[in-house]
Image (cartoon, helix red, strand yellow):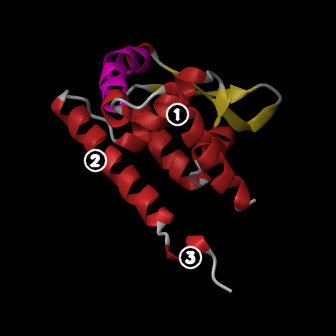
């Protein structure tokens, strides 16, 4: 028995949209003079929102494997944007913080990110966003 969704390539539509947004954001970061990739921005953004987050928590939140997060954090640390601090009570665990330079970079790059978000959203309304989140959450939950 076929289902009406069998012929709807919603995954492809989601994937191509994400790629388009990532490319636009990367272009704007480059043009803004930021030495950041989109993946680096994503980690900086999460660290800004949750100072002292662990690398494992960051990997879970960003759906990246821990070795990838470690590599990106190593690069951000070399750039002076992020610092690791040993977690209290667990020498194997590190908590992440933005440095002053990292906080400045966040503050300077955020308007570019916000502009890309605004451009992507266009003239859609708040109710559109609520429907979008509901649909995406439903698709996500269907795979749990």
Foreground: 77 or 33? 33
Q: CA distance from mark 1 to mark 2?
A: 22 Å
Point out the image quarter for the N terminus: bottom right
Q: Residue at x 52, y 33 (%)?
A: 129
Numbered badge on residue 101: none
Q: Is residue 39 above or below residue 41?
A: below
**How busy is the neighbourhood of tag 3: few (under 14 within 10 Å), some, or many (20 plus)?**
few
Mark 3, mark 2: which one is toward the viewer?
A: 3
The residue depicted at 61 percent of the width and 21 percent of the height is: 51
| Secondary structure mainly formed by the magenta segment | helix
Which residues lie in the magenta part?
102-117
Q: Which residue is mark 3?
A: 6
- Residue at the image point whose x is 34% and y is 44% from the top: 21
- Residue at the location (47% across, 30% down)? 44
Say which quarter of the image contains residue 131. top right
Q: Position of residue 80 (x, y in %)?
A: 39, 25
Which of the labelled discs sits on residue 23, or is there none? 2
In the picture, which quadrant includes the C terminus?
Answer: bottom right
Marks 3 and 1, how far apart at CA: 25 Å
Tell me which label, 1 or 2, sits earlier in the chain: 2
Mark 2 Cα shell of 10 Å, populated few (<14), some (14-19), many (≥20): few
Q: Are marks 3 and 1 in contact (CB under 8 Å)?
A: no
Q: Residue 129 — which label?
A: 1
Q: From the viewer's perspective, is 2 left or right of 10?
A: right
Instruction: Say above or below: 116 vs 138.
Output: above
Of residue 23 and residue 7, the one placed in the foreground of this image is: 7
């Amino acid at each position: 028995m076929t289902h009406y969704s069998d012929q709807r390539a919603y995954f492809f539509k989601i994937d191509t949209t994400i790629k388009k947004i990532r490319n636009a954001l990367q272009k704007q970061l480059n043009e803004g003079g930021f030495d950041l990739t989109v993946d680096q921005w994503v980690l900086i953004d999460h660290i800004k929102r949750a100072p002292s987050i662990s690398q494992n928590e960051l990997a879970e939140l960003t759906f990246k494997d821990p070795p990838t997060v470690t590599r990106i954090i190593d690069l951000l640390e070399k750039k002076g944007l992020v610092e690791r601090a040993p977690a209290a009570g667990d020498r194997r665990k590190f908590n992440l913080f933005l440095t002053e330079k990292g906080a400045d970079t966040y503050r300077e790059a955020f308007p570019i990110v916000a502009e890309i978000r605004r451009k992507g959203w266009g003239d859609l309304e708040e109710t559109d966003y609520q429907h979008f989140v509901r649909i995406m959450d439903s698709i996500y939950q269907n795979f749990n």
